[in-house]
Amino acid sequence: MASMSTIPQLTLNNGVEMPALGFGVFQTPPDETRSAVEAALSAGYRHIDTAAAYGNERQVGEAVAKSGLDRSAVFLETKIWISDYGYDETLHGFDKSAGKLGVDQIDLLILHQALPSDFDKTLGAYRALETLLADGKVRAIGVSNFMVDHLTALLDRATVVPAVNQIEVHPYFAQREVQAFGAQHGILSQAWSPIGGITFYREGEHTSTLQDPVIAGIAQAHGKTPAQVMLRWHLQQGRSAIPKSTKPARMAENLDVVDFELTADELAAIDGLDTGKRGGPEPAVITLENFHRDIPEA
Ligand code: NDP
């Protein structure tokens, strides 16, 4: 079984260490989240990625508490939803998330989306993250789904460079431009849907990454599974990745990626699968009107 020591650590731009592989709980219903996170912690995960908008922070917190693990042994990442943007609202958003998670301090707090139609609100929200960081309420701050124009506008006004930009990255959608911009500025790219989940939740024009012949061929050559090859691709390219599964065997499989190495040719072959087509919502069209969601009090 994988243990924490086998999961590579990444050092964020402020020196904080984060396990490169985390466990995602998007679309895991609240009543299944507790057992999923308990199983993930037993499998060896020490980094959980949730969000206020997922409605399952409370169950994540309960699973961590029940595990008996030291609070400092588990890296907790969550996201402020756009409905809580604005300086005061986001400060309160922290209280809601920390309250549900049952913790005093959140390891990594990020803005879930840019709000291009109201970027001042986005900046207000980010200023609140900077305050929370200065006050020691969070150990690191970042963003999610920020494109190059959003990052540029943010860096123009921010005093703290985001530690992380959590974006859709899998072999069929690589977002190389955003990743390169992040790398230039010390912003770590963290892959959501790292094994292509978003492409198999919905009807696409291509088959699932799990059935891709190039990935399957590489998997066979290493005696590994397609999911393991994709996660290894992320790690070797320096990204964090947060695969999700509700099945303990897959949780373990997705952590068992430290005992093999992809060659430069194999990495390039996977890079070659990029379709340039996003599975998730287009970040430019996110508005409060079409994506509003009330985040309940803790
Ligand atoms: P993933 O790429 O992690 O894929 C998850 C899907 O793959 C599930 O259907 C899961 O099914 C299946 N699966 C998991 N492991 C394996 C395996 N080894 N072999 C075969 N199938 C497997 O996609 P997600 O979209 O869930 O993304 C992961 C996380 O990223 C989310 O949980 C969330 O934390 C984050 N995220 C963030 C977003 C953002 O806007 N910031 C947007 C979307 C996701 P099963 O559960 O049945 O095993």
Image (cartoon, rainbow, N blue to C red):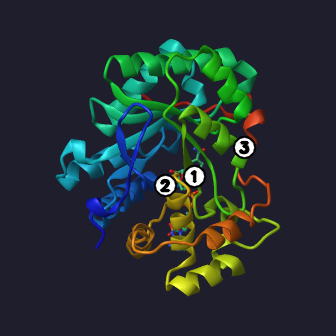
Q: Which residue is rendered at x = 27% and y = 29% of the image?
A: 104
CB of mark 2 within 8 Å of CB of mark 3?
A: no
Residue 206: image quadrant is: bottom right
For residue 192, the mark is 1
Q: Residues within 10 Å of mark 3 (few under 14, many from 20)?
A: few
Q: Residues within 10 Å of mark 2 (few under 14, many from 20)?
A: many
Percent x, y of residue 195: 58, 64
Compare marks 1 and 3 and give the one earlier in the sequence. Answer: 3
At mark 3, the secondary structure is helix
Q: Which residue is mark 2?
A: 242
Quadrant hosting ligand 1: bottom right
Q: Residues within 10 Å of mark 1 (few under 14, many from 20)?
A: many
Say if disc 2 is inside 8 Å of ligand 1.
yes
- Report the front residue among 24 and 190: 190
CB of mark 2 within 8 Å of CB of mark 1?
A: yes
Compare marks 2 and 1 and give the one earlier in the sequence. Answer: 1
Q: Which residue is mark 3?
A: 177
Three-letter code for the amino acid on which mark 1 is drawn = Trp
Residue 205 is left or right of residue 170, and the answer is right
